[in-house]
């Protein structure tokens, strides 16, 4: 496929994505039980009651979808650059489940008891980041022997996902009733359970991670030459690696803490954008952040409307989309001799 | 030659070695690389050619001895400074995403910060490496030889027009046909003379080395066997014993050049 956009039109591509994001926000704001049309939102022609509900319920949800969507897609694109492998998705590599296992441990074991009640969820967020960070490092340490080999990475991710799943299962045996309820409520994922204060703290933690990831977009291109050639070109690969791992941990950790596991976003968005914009990370990383926000806004709107008045967990929906996409990537890659 | 004694070498290696006396990977050797000179590093597989290159770049620290670039130890150069004065082409390069060829070449400008993929410099470097015909193609769709020329263009772009830079090439021509070998080597020779570069080139083909190098360094089992002009180094007995092959050597009087051939 020819690239639809040359490098020079990078700004145009980002502008288009911004417009698409704006449209997605308008669509998402009127999808669901509480429907406020774009015209109403722009002109402010609505009852103050509607506005209150919208700003207290819908607005945080939209912001959360954008935050989580851009975080996951950006982390995915950066991971793929770091591993030089288009299949390196935070979900597939087990980073999300590592973060979620950390949260499970946090809920079941009385670590949180040391903290005052109102700090419990901040602790949960932090612990999810730590869990994501540890898994990230583990994968990377192990991956150095496999030299970023695709099959090897996927198997390592499979093993970590299985292990984390098993441990989470064990935890649910140990947990008491209340913890169990807390775990299963959180484990379902979804964007509908977040209060404004949680969102604000989540954004405060995640945004530095996103900025960190965006700041290394040039370096990630150079890294594609291989460690040795990158070093010869003047790149400090170690520093780059630390930055990407930290940024990914923050993005994925906060996403998991706030919305549970939402899979395949980090795989699909960068892959689709790479086909259109080319593989250069300078454009791919910001575009992925925007694309992730758009996709999760739309997916969440669907999740709210498909089975209305009930809601489908949005993580389920992205997996329904992403699973087949992943299989298609694999099949296509096998035909072409690469993925 | 007498004048050279007063010219500072681009790179000086003193008594550099790798490994222990009973398990040498490279026995102690001295090496001076001068601007405007081409040195071919030859020897059988496993002779230590790539190890020598790694020592000269500072990628591996020598067990003993020291390497100086200009008047400073390698360790006294910052990575960015080094990248602007020295570039190396490896034997293989993994690129799994389909970058365009000019984007790959532009990556060579990372240390300079002027890495636009369509800059005149990138195009000149591609022309010099015989890769300009590949402009606009995706790197993942190229043959081995074509990729090699793109990578060569990248390392050329990295030190483009820098006087007295050091260029290290590990088997740069292994996948090129005769015509391309000649074309690229002529270009390299011109660049080396023009900018006073010092070129170190690992080569398998002794005849190619004899044609293009000012000096040949012959290694065997981690030991320096000979260092000098091609005519001196390509001694039939020495080459036959180093390569454990039955060979014939010819002297071409018109070209004033030694050629080595396998016996049947």
Image: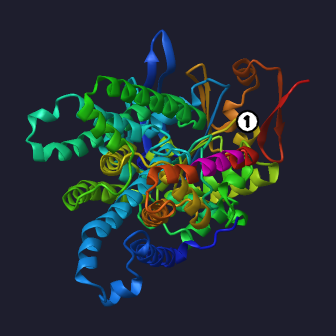
A321 w.r.t. B222: above or below: below
First to last magenta residue range: A323-331
Position of B255 with respect to A210 (left or right) is right
- Given residues A97 and B258, the one toward you in this image is A97
Q: Position of residue B107 (x, y in %)?
A: 51, 58
- In the visual, does A90 lie left or right of B226? left
**Foreground of the two, A231 or A90:** A90
Q: Quadrant of the N terminus of chain A?
A: bottom right
Residue with the most extreme top position: B22
Could you tell me residue B79's position as x and y percent?
A: 36, 48
Residue at image x 63%, y 56%?
A: B98
Residue B104 covered by magenta stretch: no
Q: Going by the image, does B173 lie left or right of A218?
A: right
Q: Which chain is mark 1 on?
A: B
Residue A179 at what x, y percent from top left?
25, 34
Q: Residues within 10 Å of mark 1 (few under 14, many from 20)?
A: many
- Give the residue at mark 1: B206
Residue A246 in view in this figure:
yes
Q: Per the image, is A329 magenta? A: yes
């Amino acid at each position: 496929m020819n690239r639809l956009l040359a490098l020079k039109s990078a700004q145009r591509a980002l502008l288009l994505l911004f417009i698409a994001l704006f449209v997605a926000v308008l669509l998402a704001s009127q999808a669901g039980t509480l429907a406020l049309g774009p015209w109403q939102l722009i002109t402010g022609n609505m009852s103050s009651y509607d506005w209150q509900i919208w700003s207290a319920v819908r607005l945080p949800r939209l912001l959360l979808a954008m935050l989580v969507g851009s975080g996951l897609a950006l982390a995915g694109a950066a991971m793929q650059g770091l591993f030089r492998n288009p299949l390196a998705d935070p979900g597939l590599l087990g980073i999300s489940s590592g973060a979620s296992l950390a949260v499970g441990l946090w809920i079941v074991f009385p670590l949180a008891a040391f903290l005052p009640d109102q700090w419990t969820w901040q602790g949960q967020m932090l612990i999810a980041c730590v869990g994501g960070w540890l898994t990230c490092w583990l994968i990377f340490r192990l991956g150095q022997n496999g030299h970023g080999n695709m099959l090897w990475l996927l198997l390592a991710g499979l093993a970590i996902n299985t292990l984390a799943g098993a441990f989470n299962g064990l935890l649910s045996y140990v947990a008491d009733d209340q913890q169990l309820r807390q775990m299963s409520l959180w484990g379902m994922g979804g964007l509908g359970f977040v209060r404004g204060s949680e969102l604000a703290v989540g954004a405060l933690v995640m945004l530095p991670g996103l900025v960190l990831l965006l700041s290394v977009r040039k370096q990630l291109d150079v890294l594609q030459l291989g460690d040795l050639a990158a070093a010869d070109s003047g790149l400090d690969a170690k520093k780059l690696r630390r930055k990407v791992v930290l940024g990914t941990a923050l993005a994925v950790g906060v996403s998991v803490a706030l919305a549970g596991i939402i899979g395949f976003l980090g795989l699909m968005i960068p892959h689709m954008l790479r086909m259109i914009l080319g593989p250069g990370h300078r454009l791919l990383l910001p575009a992925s952040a925007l694309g992730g926000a758009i996709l999760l806004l739309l997916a969440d709107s669907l999740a709210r409307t498909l089975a209305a008045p009930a809601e489908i967990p949005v993580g389920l929906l992205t997996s329904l989309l992403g699973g087949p996409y992943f299989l298609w990537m694999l099949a296509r890659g096998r035909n072409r001799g690469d993925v | 030659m007498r004048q050279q004694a007063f010219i500072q070498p681009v790179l000086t290696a003193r008594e550099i070695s790798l490994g222990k006396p009973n398990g040498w990977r490279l026995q102690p050797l001295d090496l001076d690389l001068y601007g405007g000179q081409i040195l071919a590093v030859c020897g059988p597989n496993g002779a230590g050619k790539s190890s020598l290159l790694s020592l000269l770049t500072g990628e591996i620290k020598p067990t003993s001895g020291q390497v100086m670039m200009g008047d400073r130890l390698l360790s006294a150069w910052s990575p960015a400074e080094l990248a602007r004065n020295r570039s190396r082409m490896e034997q293989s390069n993994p690129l799994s995403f389909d970058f365009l060829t000019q984007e790959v070449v532009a990556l060579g400008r990372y240390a300079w910060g002027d890495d636009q993929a369509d800059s005149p410099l990138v195009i000149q470097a591609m022309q010099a490496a015989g890769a300009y015909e590949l402009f606009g193609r995706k790197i993942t769709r190229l043959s081995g030889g074509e990729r090699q020329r793109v990578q060569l263009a990248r390392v050329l772009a990295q030190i483009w027009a820098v006087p007295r830079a050091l260029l290290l090439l590990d088997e740069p021509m292994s996948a090129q046909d005769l015509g391309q070998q000649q074309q690229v080597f002529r270009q390299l020779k011109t660049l080396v003379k023009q900018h006073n570069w010092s070129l170190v080139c690992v080569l398998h083909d002794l005849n190619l080395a004899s044609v293009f190098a000012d000096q040949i360094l012959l290694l065997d089992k981690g030991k320096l066997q000979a260092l000098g002009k091609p005519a001196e180094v390509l001694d039939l007995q020495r080459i036959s014993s180093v390569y454990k092959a039955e060979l014939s050597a010819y002297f071409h009087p018109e070209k004033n050049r030694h050629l080595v051939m396998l016996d049947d």
